[in-house]
Amino acid sequence: MSDADIGVGGTLVWYYYICLRQVWLISHQITPDADDGNLILGRFIGETSYNREKKELAIGSSKMDVYHFNNGEMVVGEVKKSSKYNQSARMQLAFYLKELHKRGIQARGELRFPQEKKKEEVILDEDTLAEIERVERDILRLVYLQQPPPPVKNRFCKKCAYSEFCWS
Ligand code: SF4
């Protein structure tokens, strides 16, 4: 894999907090079954919730939803199926805020969990920025591994679209 193939995007940041093996599989385009029920539900929620106010913005390899402007500040966000993946969702959004910040755009984040009728604010502070930069470096380290890291049982395996691949 050449450097040109690799761009650490929000999706890899998301999977970093779920499973390091998934980061490797996805970055090597080994994708799970597209008909997996969890993926379909996630896509459906993303496509149908808050559609009236949603606009998509692409920056580099990242795509984010722009909700609105508040006193000149951009509010970007993500719609998620469940707050079970809260840490992944927060850090993915923080990564988007960092990408905007790099380009001189001030923004804050808003995570939305329509099924739970919940919203959470995400701010890019110094600690979060340092953590994102560390994660980006570690994702690159993982992506360059010749083999995927071995499967390690975790609380996400049961509903993971790779579970057959990892455990059968
Ligand atoms: S089944 Fe478990 S170990 Fe395998 S990719 Fe999914 S989360 Fe990772």
Image (cartoon, grey):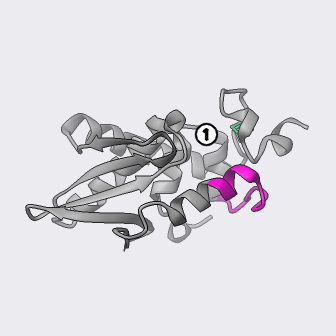
Q: Is residue 144 above or below residue 58?
A: above
Is residue 150 something that shows in the picture? no
Is residue 74 something that shows in the picture? yes
Q: Which of 32 and 102 is in front in this view?
A: 32
Q: Within the image, what quadrant is residue 21 found in?
A: top right
Q: Where is residue 85 in the image (x, y as percent from the top left)?
A: 52, 37
2 magenta-colored: no
Is ligand 1 closer than 8 angstroms to the Cβ of mark 1? yes
Q: Which of 137 and 86 is in front in this view?
A: 86
Q: Ligand 1, what quadrant?
A: top right
Which residue is depicted at the point 21% across and 67% down? 103
Q: Within the image, what quadrant is residue 18 found in?
A: top right
Which residue is depicted at the point 84% across and 45% down? 165
Q: Position of residue 110 (x, y in %)?
A: 31, 49
Query: In the displayed structure, does residue 113 sit left or right of residue 129?
Result: right
Quarter occupied by the C terminus: top right
Give the residue type at disc 1. Leu
Secondary structure character of the magenta stretch overall: loop
Residue topped by disc 1: 20
